[in-house]
Amino acid sequence: GEKQGGYSCSVRSVTEWENEDFLFEHPNYYSRYMDRKVEGDELVYSNWTKMEWPPVYYKSPKLEFAGGLLRDDQGTVQKDGVFSTGNHIIKTNNVDGRGVFYTYTDQGYRRDGDWSLTGEKWEKGTCILEFNRTCTNGKSSVDLNNMLDISSNNLFVQDTDLAFRPRITYDDKKAYPMGRWFQDDGECVDEVIRGCFNNGTCVAPDTCRCAPGWTGSDCTIPICSQTCHHNGNCTLPDTCTCERGWEGHDCSIAVCSQECNNFGKCVAPDVCHCKQWPNTFYDGYEGGGRPIFRKPNGDPQMTGWTGYDCATPICVQAEKFTLNYNGTEEAKTIKLGGHGKDGRLECSEVRCHNYNKMVTQNDGRSFQTGCGFDPIDTGCCDTIEEGERADITLQFVCHKCRDTHTLIQPHNITCVDMMIDSFEYTNVADMDDIFKFDDTTVKLCGRDHNPGGPMGVDEDGNPTNVDYYVSYLANVGPEFSSRNGLSNITSDFFLCNRDYWVQGDFVDDAGLGDIVGAGSDFGLKEGRHVRVNYPNYNKSNLVDENNNEIWMTGPAMPGEGIFECYNGGSCIAPDVCTCKDGW
């Protein structure tokens, strides 16, 4: 028959996912049977000791950081050209008092670190083989070596010959037999404990009795009481190994690298389902009128929020949707004006040139909430408050991962060994240019939003980045106002300057083929794909038999962008255009 364990005793898991001939290579899979070691994320996942199980898997460091204490082997501190070692701190709060959070990937499943093979050989390991004698006549079995009643005491033996082989001792008068010499209307079987895989018991030739949680002729198939959703696999009893982009006990929780703002939800790998609702622009016809901006089927177009992080407002009345341009030709960058970044800039003059200043532009920084500065990639500075440090002249401590330790890959950035150097400054003039915009403005750690503004405080210590639109309409919900200022994930490299965004399940459409708001109106596509944020509905020059204008769907427009209101105005909130001077 097939190999069922072969009495090569081991408590180690043997499955189709890991065995002496094969190791499953997947970023979410690792062996629970390795001798204890600390992984790249500084956590321990297997606590076995002295089992001779080499570490066949390794977990990489996390691709997220929330500040905190750095050890003396993680960078140095410099002031006035003098270096020193010792623990140093990167602040865990922004200047507005909210916690900082930096991420260094555009694929959510990587944020927590991922598993890879080490190249070590998979070893089954060793354990003690034991036997359980069971007799059909119900008689007790005695270990003749030490005269213990093993049946009544639920004991096992390690050597059946030593324990049960009949024997005779003699003296000068008599022979003394011990043990069973005849079958005596019953049969005894020595069941092999762990004689089958995964702690299964060999109870007869080619017959296994599996341990709880296992099944199959050789006990190598784990049993999960839960369904492993979204192409997850049951790899140990009640243990799902989830496909990339999913987590949780049953793989039902989607993982996004970005934040889903303005009441958006992460519904599939790196997919935000944005809050949207039918627009309320109707004509004056009887019976409530018809939608002015409608879909080809006559329904009103959806307004609300879009973009890969649900931070870009939709204006159905806008002239067009303009895709972001991340190149170098200035002519392709469209700068749009309006009454300030929050729509409330006032002017009492006949001509107000301030209304022509840039409010939004299609450079990939408008509305994208990952924009800002961090201590690994861009470098950034913490402010030092009065009384916070013994050196009262100290104003800023700036941080940057050492260039020789910065590893940039297509989907992640790693600061090897977290080698972050800190630099102390008593004034902005002495500061390295990498830490400032100009001679007077410092790049503070945290977000730098447009609209919104860079992280900063005024002379009274109040946050200055508060230029987010707040609706003045009565009886409307909070979704009509921008909540981008509540976002606190910063990743200038991966979550800013995006002209396109790759999203979606790594296998199928996650059952979301009809969802609205995760790929404009057209549902989620199968596999990884570039997100569509604009349905491209256009009013044609044609009319139907009732003399109603016919709306049509134009070519697909995948990519990130902004809504461009007429005459250079900016869309700053759902169906809210703010206009340039003269309009």
Image: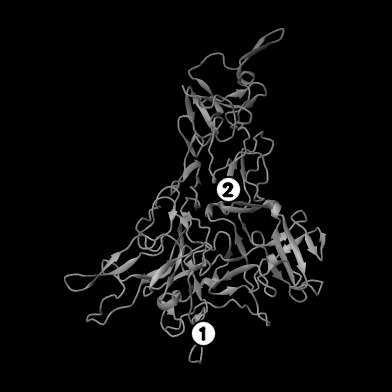
Task: Mark yes or no: residue 275 visible.
Answer: no
Q: Position of residue 191 (x, y in %)?
A: 54, 26
Residue farthest to the left, as pictured: 545
Q: Position of residue 201 (x, y in %)?
A: 53, 30
* 505 horizontally vs 10: left or right: left
Taking the spot 38% from the left edge, 63% from the top edge, the residue there is 520
Task: Mark yes or no: residue 542 visible.
Answer: yes
In the image shown, does 22 or 119 lie closer to the viewer?
119
Taking the spot 61% from the left edge, 37% from the top edge, the residue there is 56
Taking the spot 26% from the left edge, 82% from the top edge, the residue there is 284
Mark 1 = which residue? 353
Q: Callout 1: 10 Å neighbours few (<14), some, many (20+)?
A: some
Looking at the image, tell me whether mark 1 or mark 2 is earlier in sequence order. Answer: 2
Identity of the amino acid at label 2? Answer: Asp
* 303 horizontally vs 353: left or right: left
In the image shown, does 23 or 518 lie closer to the viewer?
518
Compared with 148, 433 (above or below) is below
Mark 2 = which residue? 114
Question: Do labels 1 and 2 touch, CB within 8 Å?
Answer: no
Quarter of the image for the C terminus: give it: bottom left
Secondary structure state at the residue bearing disc 2: loop
* 551 horizontally vs 529: left or right: left
Which of pointers 1 and 2 indicates the residue nearer the eye?
Answer: 1
Identity of the amino acid at label 1? Answer: His
